[in-house]
Amino acid sequence: MSTTSARSNDLGLPPGTLIHVGEKRTEKVRITVIDYSESECQERAVSTVAECAGLKDTPTVTWINVDGVHDVDVIRDLGKQFDLHPLLLEDIANTTQRAKAEDYNDYLFTVLKMLYYDEEDDEVQAEQVSLVIGPRFVLSFQEREGDVFEPIRDRIRTARGRIRQTGADYLAYSLIDAIVDNYFLILEGVAERIEVMEEELVSQRAPELSHEVRRMKHQALLLRKSVWPLREVINTLGRGDSPLIQPATLPYLRDVYDHTIQVVDTIEVFRDAINSMLGTYLSVLSNRMNEVMKVLTIIATIFIPLTFVAGVYGMNFKVMPELNWRWGYPAALAVMAVVVIGMLVYFRKKKWL
């Protein structure tokens, strides 16, 4: 089901109605649970939402990750387990959300875009990640399996860093930080591609780059759309207005905010570079067209006097002394040759050749 058709099906329904909006998927939803404290860590996959009952109020920090938001029954059941607002659940199932942060008093809700490089299509794609941050739990919802959170899982398993010594707010920060750090890897790949395109732009392959330049422009727009609202999201979390965010976590969130600003600035530089490449591409095409027109004009100019001479002696009037002259034809050719050589010397002197 396309995004447009899914939205049309949502028209007229009451707020909070759960309808999946996004790419149609049929695979089974995967739910993993990580319970940890400073002294212990338990990780397991669960087959039903019922197995998550009671995890909301455990003394340990609980991270529940859901891979797949196309099964709205799973989202609805988790919402009941953790007393989540119906509008929040509706936003989770709608994968076209803009990055945002909302405070529901008992928990915080954030929507972010996780970027990854699709090697098959050779382009950057975005996946929506929704986070629900509670006093002792974090719920993360992704569109599909595969993410950038594996280093965080390793840190929890091995008790590296301070993540096992902190609360759910620090876990949420770590997830957001992992998403933002991955932006830099994506941008490095985009920067390398832009450099290659700039080198190819002035080569003989320039006419073949039109589609590539426009595709890169589309990707730059996708990057900007995904990252630009993230500044306000992290700024909202970093202000410390919610008691769910501990003061010790605020400096880390401000650091992520600085990284986000760097990403936004880099994307703007990329957009300027791509727009400049598009202008350069058009200039290269124009210059080549001018070169072709220049050659054709010179050829036409050379043949104008030759055509005049041939036209004069092609009139076939009876009273034309040269027609009966034995050396008339060689003389006409000689005159034409002198005219051509003279014009070429003149063009060379004017640096038109």
Image (cartoon, rainbow, N blue to C red):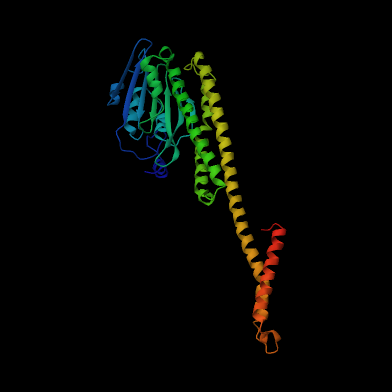
Question: Where, by quadrant of the figure, is residue 344 drawn?
Answer: bottom right
- Image quadrant occupied by the N terminus: top left
x and y percentages locating residue 238 in the rendered image: 53, 21
Q: Could you tell me which residue is drawn at 55 percent across and 32 percent down?
A: 264
Left or right of 28, for residue 195 = right
Residue most extreme to the left: 47
User: Residue drawn 42% across and 17% down?
Assistant: 168
Residue at 34 percent of width and 17 percent of height: 35
Where residue 335 sits: x, y (%)?
Answer: 69, 74
* Residue depicted at 65% across the width and 64% down the height: 298
Tell me which corner region of the image, top left, top right, bottom left or bottom right, holds residue 307: bottom right
Q: Does residue 35 lie above or below 190 as drawn?
A: above
> Which residue is farthest front?
326
Q: Is 341 in front, or is 260?
A: 341
Up the image or down, 330 lies above or below 194; here it is below
Q: Where is residue 268 in the image (x, y as percent from the top left)?
A: 57, 35
Which residue is farthest bottom?
318
Residue 98 spot, x, y in % from top left: 48, 34
Above or below for 345 versus 105: below
Q: Count how many numbered circles sit on residues in the image.
A: 0
Does residue 170 appear in the picture of this structure? Answer: yes
Q: Is residue 53 visible?
A: no
Q: In this view, does 330 lie to the left or right of 244?
A: right
Q: Is residue 229 above or below residue 295?
A: above
Which quarter of the figure is the C terminus placed in? bottom right
Q: Nearer the viewer, residue 334 or 209?
A: 334
Viewed as shown, does residue 239 lie left or right of 167? Answer: right
